[in-house]
Structures are given as C-alpha cells and as structure tokens.
Image (spheres, rainbow, N blue to C red):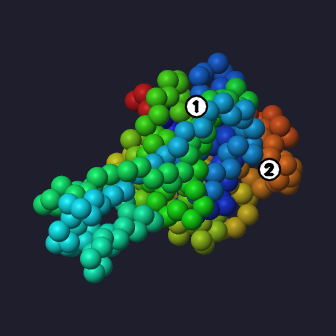
Amino acid sequence: MKISIASGKGGTGKTTIATNLAVVVARTGKDVAYLDCDVEEPNGHIFLKPEITEQLDVTIPIPKVDIDKCTLCGECSAACEYHAIAVLGKSVQVFPSLCHGCGGCIDVCPEDAIEEIPRTIGHISRGVGMGVKFYEGRLNVGEVLSPPVTRALRKLPTKSDVIIIDAPPGTSCPVIEAIRGTDFVILVTEPTPFGLNDLELAVGMVRELDLPYGVVINCSDIGDNRTKEYCRREGIDILMEIPYDRQVAVAYSRGEMMFSVNSQYEENLHKLYQNIIDRNSR
C-alpha cells in the first residue's frame, strides 16, 4: 500500500501528517517505510530522528566529447533543447548544470564522438527512526533537477507493508514524480483563500493522474468554510479535520510528534489509515 501525502502549497502540515501517520501505522505491527521525496528541503528526519546506516549518490549522465573524433558538425548542439552542449570555434563546450541527461546528443552524433559520464546531483540516506524505515532524498545545493533524485528514491527496493511518501509542495514535475503510481493521495490543506486556490490546483493534478484521493483540513477551526463547501460541491471526501492546537504547534517546533501531546491524534490517524485501506479494497 503506497500512500502519498501532498499539498498545493507549502506550510499546510504535510510532513506532520506524513511522519505521524508513518509512526502510528508502524505501532500496529505493520512494516512501514517513510520516503521523504521533498528533496529540495527534506525535513522528515527532524521528527523521525533516524539512525542513518547508508548513503547512496544519485547521478545523471552528462556528455563527454572526444575532440579527436569530433568534426565540429554541430549536430549535438542543434539537438539539445537545453543548450547544455555547444560548438564554439574549434571546441565543444559542455555545461553540466544545464544537462538533463537525455542522451540526445549521443544519438545524433555521426562520428560516435560522445560518451556519457556520471555527475552526482544528490544523495539518498537510509536508516530507521521510531520503528519506521527511513529514506530521504536530498538534492545538492546549487542543483536544479530534483526529479532524478525523487525517481531514484522511488525505485529503491522497499519491501514494506505500507509506504508513506512525503511529496514536495505544489503541482509541478517534482510532485508528479513523487506521487505517480501510488494507491492513494492525501491532500493536506488549510481553510484560507491561498489554501483553497492551491487545493483546487492539486485536485486537478490528481484527477489528471487518475489517482484516488481525499482531503485533510489542518487548522480547520480558523479561516472560513469555503474549503469545505468546495469539497462538498466537488464530491471530495474530507478524511480528517485537525483544529488549531497550540500544544501541537509547540511540539512541532521541538521536532516532536503531535500525538505525544494528545493521544486522541493517534486514534484519529489510525482511523484515517483504516479509512484509506477500506476505500482501496472496494
């Protein structure tokens, strides 16, 4: 069972739900893995406090030109949509930070003068925290291509009963790479104009991907009722409502689980998980 937690915007409580849900499900005896796919700013480790046992580099292939074979025909440069390779005078320049590793330049080179070499753009950490298998992708500072790191993280052999995927915020390519192929998507939102606007975008995204989903409303007792009205209008299930709780906010700032301040949250999260299981088995 792969459950992804996403949100149209940052700061809605996505990681809070993802980490707490992972621990709550693990406490039932399930083998649970948590994947932090928010590779540009992963923070699940703050709450799960894992002991890291392994790190793996994530690389993408970039071209290396054999200038002795190269005839400076410019076919590689013309084929590259990202301008990562260019013929300049009597040399060929490669711009690694622009390269997407697609291999197009190799395909079109008539002289077989280009080979691929790996370039590290990030890494994956693996360990265990609070009874949960922990996997974190982290993009290196200055890099711009996060999907390859997420893709490498999702491809890891994870033999677990339940996989919780903490997706990045938004609705762009990194999010789609994280949630694609999951069994259920939890969209975490808040009852504000910005929250509703970005929820509508997130709903459009999961519908386009044809993924089953439901909504969790955080800080549900503040703001207005427009988010609930939108969900009712669109036939979207509200899976859980979490009222504003200062104790939870304090626990969050300390990197603690929200159910540590109120055991009712553990019961509610277990009901959330069971609700998803029931929906998936229909």
- Examine the rendering and report whether any part of residue 267 can be seen: no
Q: Along the horizontal axis of the image, is 146 left or right of 83?
A: right
Counting from the top left corner in percent of width and height, residue 57 is at 53, 43
Q: Residue furthest left?
A: 110
Counting from the top left corner in percent of width and height, residue 103 is at 27, 55
Vertical placement of residue 65 versus 236, above or below: below
At mark 2, the secondary structure is helix
Q: Which mark is residue 252?
A: 2
Q: Nearer the viewer, mark 2 or mark 1?
A: 1
Q: Residues within 10 Å of mark 2 (few under 14, many from 20)?
A: some
* Residue that appears at 32% across and 51% down: 116
Cβ atoms at labels 2 and 1 below 8 Å apart: no
Q: Residue furthest front?
A: 68
What's the amino acid at mark 2? Tyr
Viewer-proximal residue among 53 and 201: 53
Determine which quarter of the picture holds residue 107.
bottom left
Q: Residues within 10 Å of mark 1 (few under 14, many from 20)?
A: many
Q: Which mark is residue 206?
A: none
At mark 1, the secondary structure is strand
Q: Which mark is residue 33?
A: 1
What's the amino acid at mark 1? Ala
Counting from the top left corner in percent of width and height, residue 163 is at 53, 33
Vertical placement of residue 198 versus 62, above or below: below
Viewer-proximal residue among 12 and 86: 86
Viewer-proximal residue among 95 and 225: 95
* Residue that appears at 70% across and 67% down: 223
Counting from the top left corner in percent of width and height, residue 71 is at 17, 68
